[in-house]
């Protein structure tokens, strides 16, 4: 049982402000993922929660108690490091039992707790080995085991999968999701990989330049990005953006002219948008479809066939757009192609990069990863700008 | 397939051997000729003061040497000197390395200063210590004890071996510091932070994380220092000349006394052979220890 609250956290290294006032609430048993490009401050934020770094200002509350001045060991947290940070001269068992050894727990009790954790992670046959005799995935599990043994109120994961190869990463991702369910603990997870974020999170926190860009469930971030940065960051391949001109705008939608002259009615709240203004329209590659009578057109520059699907990189008015199409499309490089999109799938962004609010919420936007668990399900919440 | 490869390797082995031969031969000669001559002389009557007395001596030289109480005293002195200097430099070097790893103002300059004694040649540093630090009337240490109203210590006559140990340790502490500091820089910061999360304070981190990490580097320091400390000579020659009595005569200095003060090459050579045997015994233990550590 643990909740975490960050109130207006600021971190400065010398003159550079790395974290610029972060507010965040983490509910009990929630799986929260901090995601953002490298240098966005996500790791620093986690290290401040862990107590390895002090906050310049603001409050860190765990279960409502201010923890700013409490040492890292006494916050009741456990952290899994990107490099695993196992103690190389200790066996797996000693690695996992180290915190208890420091706390003076008797040996028999220590062993029982280690065995318990080892059972969850299938580490029993490896307990006498040294870390260097383990594979990457096994080391990762030992690092997780070391965290489990401490029975923490909150687990912290700092890019734990980035040192693993692709196949192992998928496997560990599933294992982590299973672990979250089994331990029923609050977990905070830092990654730069948006697939990890989308697949595991109950709640994603998108960070950029030390600022929280948006907080919400994976589906709400995907369907209702708050601004252009989130729209571009979440989803793979990246969302396509191009400039459009406003014809008319109102509370019931915005009429824009697409490149090529076709008109399009986007169902977003256009109050305050002046006709004639230039907006940016965003549409995901998977929402662009190839149609004979499509409103947009261009020439295929690169074609990537993945078997099940094909990525087309199409040049439209000197801009490269990505289209995810069926694996069997017959087009070839340098062919001309017409394509269109469902206007309800499109996003409009104003000059400051903020998204115009969608008139209809996507039915999945409020869905969490484990929606069947009603008490842990969280509503998506927008961060204060 | 295996056979081809095996025979191919045999040909390659022969070729490789023939190409290595000149270097190996040179090194063998380089080592074997002085060794052979030392062994040869150790069985000869060979005293520069008595040119008439020559010929095969059998084990006479060894008999004389091994029954000479000076040899055992010299061995004891050698072990004391090596042991104490090792203890001081390894313990001090580890603590200093941890200290110099902490960030503080002017750390780079402080590191260079701390390492600089290693660059002073042994004769010079011994002279500096003798005439400027430990001199009973004009030395810094005498001045210091006078400041506290204490009588000045005449270091080289009342604490001769201690004085030598201090001088040699002062020279070798920077070496240990240098090696251990370098090793410390390769300590994964994440490990230290993981230990902090596990509840380890600075002392626990030192004993559970830092020391095990430095184990290899420490064994390398011990090995290298021991090789050089077994043959300490200049410091003794410049300061105490092995005295008072035999208080600071180590094996190397005893061999010098026999060869160039007593002019008995035969006995000195026998001493040399004894020193080689001693060094080899030490080396066996050392190599085992280091090899075990490097295996870990």
Image (spheres, rainbow, N blue to C red):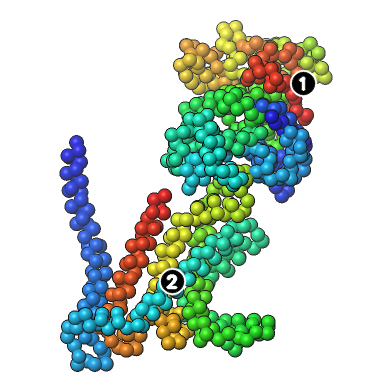
Mark 2, Cα crowd under 10 Å, few <14 / some 14-19 / many 20+, is many
Task: Give how far across and how far down residue A187 sits, in percent.
Answer: 64, 30
Task: Give how far across and how far down residue B4 sits, in percent.
Answer: 17, 40
Identify the residue at image location x=47%, y=19%. Answer: A306
Tell me the subunit letter for badge 1. Answer: A
Instruction: Please indicate, yes or no, whether residue A8 appears anywhere in the rendered image.
Output: yes
Q: Is residue B231 above or below residue B180?
A: below
Disc 1: which residue:
A277
Tell me the subunit letter for badge 2. Answer: B
Describe the element under mark 2 as helix, strand or loop: helix
Q: Which mark is residue B240?
A: none
Q: Is residue A16 left or right of residue A159?
A: right
The answer to which of A380 and A333 lies nearer the viewer is A380
Task: Give how far across and how far down residue A231 sits, in percent.
Answer: 66, 24
Furthest-right residue in view? A272
Identify the residue at image location x=44%, y=83%. Answer: B247
Q: Is residue A377 left or right of residue B26?
A: right
* Quadrant hosting residue B145: bottom right
Q: Is residue B38 left or right of residue B189?
A: left
Identify the residue at image location x=81%, y=13%. Answer: A251
Q: Distance of mark 2 from mark 1, alpha carbons? A: 86 Å
Disc 2: which residue:
B82
Instruction: Please indicate, yes or no, whether residue A230 appears anywhere in the rendered image.
Output: no
Q: Is residue A161 above or below residue B102?
A: above
């Amino acid at each position: 049982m643990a909740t975490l609250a960050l109130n207006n956290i600021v971190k400065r290294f010398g003159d550079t402000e790395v974290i610029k006032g972060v507010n965040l609430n983490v509910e009990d048993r929630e799986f929260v993922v901090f995601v953002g490009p490298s240098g966005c401050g996500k790791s620093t934020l986690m290290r401040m929660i862990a107590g390895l770094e002090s906050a310049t200002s603001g409050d860190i509350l765990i279960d409502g108690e201010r923890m700013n001045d409490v040492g890292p060991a006494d916050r009741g947290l456990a952290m899994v490091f990107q490099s695993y940070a196992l103690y190389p001269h200790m066996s797996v068992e000693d690695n996992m039992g180290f915190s208890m050894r420091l706390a003076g727990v008797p040996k028999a009790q220590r062993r029982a707790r280690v065995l318990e954790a080892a059972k969850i992670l299938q580490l029993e046959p490896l307990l006498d080995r040294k870390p260097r005799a383990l594979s990457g995935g096994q080391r990762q599990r030992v690092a997780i085991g070391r965290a489990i043994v401490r029975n923490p109120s909150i687990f912290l994961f700092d890019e734990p999968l980035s040192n693993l190869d692709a196949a192992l990463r998928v496997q560990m991702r599933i294992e982590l999701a299973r672990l979250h369910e089994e331990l029923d603990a609050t977990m905070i997870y830092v990654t730069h990989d948006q697939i990890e974020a989308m697949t595991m999170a109950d709640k994603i926190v998108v960070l950029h330049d030390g600022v929280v860009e948006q907080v919400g469930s994976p589906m709400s971030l995907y369907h209702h990005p708050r601004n252009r940065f989130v729209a571009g960051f979440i989803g793979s391949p990246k969302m396509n953006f191009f400039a459009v001109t406003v014809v008319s705008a109102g509370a019931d939608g915005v009429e824009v002219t697409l490149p090529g002259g076709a008109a399009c009615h986007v169902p977003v709240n256009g109050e305050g948008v002046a006709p004639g203004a230039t907006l940016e329209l965003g549409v995901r590659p998977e929402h662009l479809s190839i149609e004979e009578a499509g409103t947009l057109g261009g020439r295929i520059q690169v074609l990537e066939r993945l078997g099940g699907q094909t990525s087309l990189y199409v040049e439209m008015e000197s801009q490269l757009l990505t289209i995810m199409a069926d694996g069997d499309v017959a087009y070839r490089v340098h062919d001309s192609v017409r394509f269109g999109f469902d206007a309800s799938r499109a996003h409009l962004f104003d000059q400051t990069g903020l998204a115009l609010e969608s008139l209809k919420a996507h039915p999945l936007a409020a869905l969490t990863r484990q929606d069947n668990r009603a008490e842990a399900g969280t509503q998506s919440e927008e961060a204060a700008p | 397939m295996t056979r081809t490869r095996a025979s191919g390797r045999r040909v390659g082995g022969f070729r490789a051997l023939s190409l290595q031969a000149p270097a190996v031969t040179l090194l063998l000669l380089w080592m074997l000729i002085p060794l052979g001559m030392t062994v040869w002389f150790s069985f000869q009557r060979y005293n520069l003061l008595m040119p008439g007395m020559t010929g095969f001596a059998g084990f006479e030289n060894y008999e004389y040497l091994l029954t000479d109480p000076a040899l055992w005293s010299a061995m004891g002195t050698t072990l004391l000197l090596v042991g104490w200097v090792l203890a001081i430099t390894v313990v001090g070097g580890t603590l200093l390395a941890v200290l110099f790893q902490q960030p503080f103002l002017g750390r780079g300059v402080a590191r260079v200063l701390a390492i600089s004694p290693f660059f002073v040649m042994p004769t010079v540093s011994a002279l500096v210590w003798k005439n400027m630090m430990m001199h009973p009337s004009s030395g810094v240490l005498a001045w210091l004890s006078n400041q506290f109203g204490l009588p000045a210590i005449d270091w080289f006559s009342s604490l001769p071996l201690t004085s030598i140990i201090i001088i040699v340790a002062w020279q070798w502490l920077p070496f240990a510091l240098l090696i251990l500091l370098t090793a410390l820089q390769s300590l994964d910061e994440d490990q230290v932070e993981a230990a902090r999360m596990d509840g380890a304070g600075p002392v626990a981190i030192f004993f559970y994380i830092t020391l095990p990490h430095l184990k290899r580097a420490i064994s390398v320091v011990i090995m290298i220092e021991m090789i050089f400390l077994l043959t300490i000579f200049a410091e003794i020659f410049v300061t105490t000349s092995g005295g008072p009595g035999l208080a600071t005569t180590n094996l190397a200095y005893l061999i010098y006394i026999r060869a160039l003060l007593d002019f008995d090459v035969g006995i000195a050579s026998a001493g040399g052979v004894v020193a080689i045997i001693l060094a080899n015994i030490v080396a066996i233990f050392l190599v085992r220890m280091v090899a075990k550590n490097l295996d870990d």
